[in-house]
């Protein structure tokens, strides 16, 4: 796992995911356990943030994983 965190694209993807996905997922979690004031929230802002950051985060994470796999394959050969 250290190899992945050493890759710059993987770290960027993880940071984008953390910043973009945490607000919406936090609201969903808090509403499901009853700690959010509205039991049926409609969080437009966090939903748009999730929508806009999902693609770039997944692409960066995927490219980072591919780079680590390729580097690992070249070291083994």
Image (tube, rainbow, N blue to C red):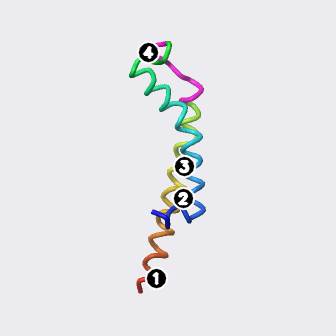
Mark 1 or mark 2, earlier in chain: 2
Q: Residues within 10 Å of mark 4 (few under 14, many from 20)?
A: few
Mark 4 or mark 1, earlier in chain: 4
Q: Secondary structure at mark 1?
A: helix
Q: Is residue 61 left or right of residue 19?
A: left
The reply to whether dot 1 and dot 3 touch (C-beta < 8 Å) is no
Where residue 56 appears, as percent x and y from the top left, is 56, 49
Read off the magenta span: 38-47
Q: Secondary structure at mark 4?
A: loop
| Residue topped by disc 1 | 75
| Residue topped by disc 4 | 40
| Residue topped by disc 3 | 57
The reply to whether dot 4 and dot 1 touch (C-beta < 8 Å) is no
| Residue plotted at (43% across, 78% down) | 73
Q: Secondary structure at mark 3?
A: helix
Q: CA distance from mark 3 to mark 4?
A: 27 Å
Relative vertical location of residue 67 with respect to residue 12 in this rendering, above or below: below
| Residue topped by disc 2 | 10
């Amino acid at each position: 796992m250290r190899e992945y965190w050493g890759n710059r694209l993987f770290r960027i993807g993880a940071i984008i995911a953390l910043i973009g996905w945490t607000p919406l997922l936090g609201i969903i979690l808090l509403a499901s356990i009853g700690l959010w004031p509205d039991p049926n929230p409609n969080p437009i802002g966090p939903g748009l943030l999730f929508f806009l950051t999902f693609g770039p985060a997944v692409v960066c994470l995927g490219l980072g994983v591919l780079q680590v796999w390729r580097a690992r394959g070249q070291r083994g050969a």
